[in-house]
Amino acid sequence: MEHANLAVQILLPLLSVIIVLTILTARRRQLFIRRIQGLTAIDEAIGRATEMGRPMVCSIGLGGIDVPTLQALAITSYIIRASARFNTRAIVPISDPTAYPIVEEAVRDSYLAEGRPEQFNAEDIRFLSNRQFAFAASVAGLIWREKAAACFYFGLFFAESLIFAETGQQAGAIQVAGTPSTTQIPFFIAACDYVIIGDEFYAASAYLSREPTLLGSLVGQDIAKGILILIVLFGSALVSLSGVLGNTWGQTFIQMFK
Amino acid sequence: MSGLFQPAQGGAWYIRIVGALIVSAILLLALMNVPRRFRKPLIGLVTFLGGLFFALEFFLPTHPMPTPDSPDQVGNFLTPYVVPFGNIAQVIGAWTVGLGVINLMQVHGRRLLKGTSGAFNSAAFFLCMILMMVIGILYRVHPNAINKNLYALLFNGALQSLDATMFSIVAFYIVSAAYRAFRVRSVEATLLLITAVIVMLGQIAVGQWLTHALPKNLHVEIVRDWILTKANAPAVRAVAFGLGIGGLAVALRIWLGLERGSYFEEQG
């Protein structure tokens, strides 16, 4: 079992407190959030699918019930709500069976929230396979057969990311992707129209919903990142200085993080 | 209490299986009858308690807790329960596999009955599922040579090969994606192309031979290493920092029930 070292015992509670405090204070203030191109493109893609009268495919990746998948589900819920308003069909393929009931419930709630419960079709929430490449083949086939006009890839992706994105590209779909899997970001950039990178993925729900709690959380994240940048700069300076002076301060500092 | 988490043998194993099924059925019925307005607070409470357990186990001071498998293990009074609690998630996951299979059977069953365009694929699905299930059960119950070979034929011969085929397709997709990405359309795309050419040349012997006459710092493999370790790695780590903090923020919001506006209620 892994346990917290000294640096984690100090930093994690500190950053957590900062994030929670900014969430609580943000509820009383109007906050600004910069434009994120990839997220603005979601509406464009939904509009295109609506104009073409063709369905959209929203994949939440291979994750089960974990933080990235829940975040992907939050973005997907927004897409479903928008698609419900425009009466556009959205298909959600699922790989992990543990996520299936949660996704089904979230999608049903999204249609209900827009006052269109009759549009909910349980068959559009499809568990395909929990085997990576069987799922990849299924989603690729789904994109081709349904002639998807827009494809959204938000969540955890691995080697299947390029299979999805290239199939969507060949099918002529407008594609928007966002993933915390840093190794898959280049593939999405090469094959998708818009990609949200890094922590923009976690900023997406705040950007889309404009809820004060989520916006406050973003401010907390920025402060936390600032602290980490300061630590990196301080560490780099200390290690360099230790090298010049010939002492062990730098090594002691590094050991705190191991 | 901890005895409940120890493996059982013989009659006790059957008693526990039956007991677990009865308890699960009662729990499932009780959860299905929870009024809608209490569902989210209930989910929030279970999430908070689960998160609290793992957070305390991670943060509380540790002391040596050697086991026969890992003599160097350290832990605290909560550590012995981490694996059993993790198993609960696996058990819940196992239940949901059934839901997934039901969903598949509904979709394909309806398509087969209607005889629509995808009916042939749906028939193939049922055939493969039933065949794999029957052979799998036969292999477990009677592991003789015939069943073993049949299972190997289906699993290694068919399923694994199909997986490998799909994975192989990635190679071709990489070429077509790279062609689009490397087209010289802007300054950024040109920089990407130059960088990619250097890294690719640095990976192969021909590239290294091409620059072997140049000063050492201009050898393509040295430049490649510089790009990967001094330019690429810090950028990826910076992205990872942002992702880590973002993940922490989302996890905190979910754990403390502060998540709003997506699949949770709006603030208005």
Image (cartoon, coloured by chain):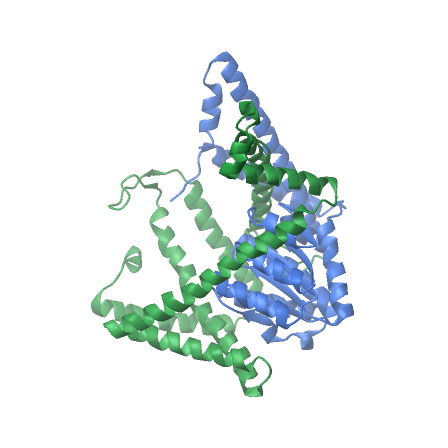
Chain colours: A blue, B green
Quadrant where the image shows the N terminus of chain A: top left
The residue at the point 61 percent across, 42 percent down is A19
Judge whether residue A131 can be spotted in this image: no
Could you say which is closer to the camera, residue B19 or residue B162?
Answer: B162
Residue A225 visible in image: yes
State the residue in front, B68 or A141: A141
State which quadrant residue B193 falls in.
top right
Q: Residue furthest left?
A: B10
Which residue is depicted at the point 73% across and 64% down?
A46
The residue at 48%/62% (across/down) is: B165
Q: Where is residue B215 shown, x and y percent of the image?
A: 56, 22
Q: Is residue B25 left or right of residue B169?
A: left
Give the residue furthest to the right.
Answer: A51
Q: Nearer the viewer, residue B266 or A239?
A: A239
x and y percent of residue B163 in the render?
Answer: 46, 62
Vertical side of B252 occupied by B154: above or below: below
- Which residue occupies the foreground of this view, A192 or B103? A192
Horizontal and vertical percent position of residue A21: 63, 42
Residue A127 horizontal/vertical position (percent):
53, 69
Residue A131 falls left or right of residue A207 = left
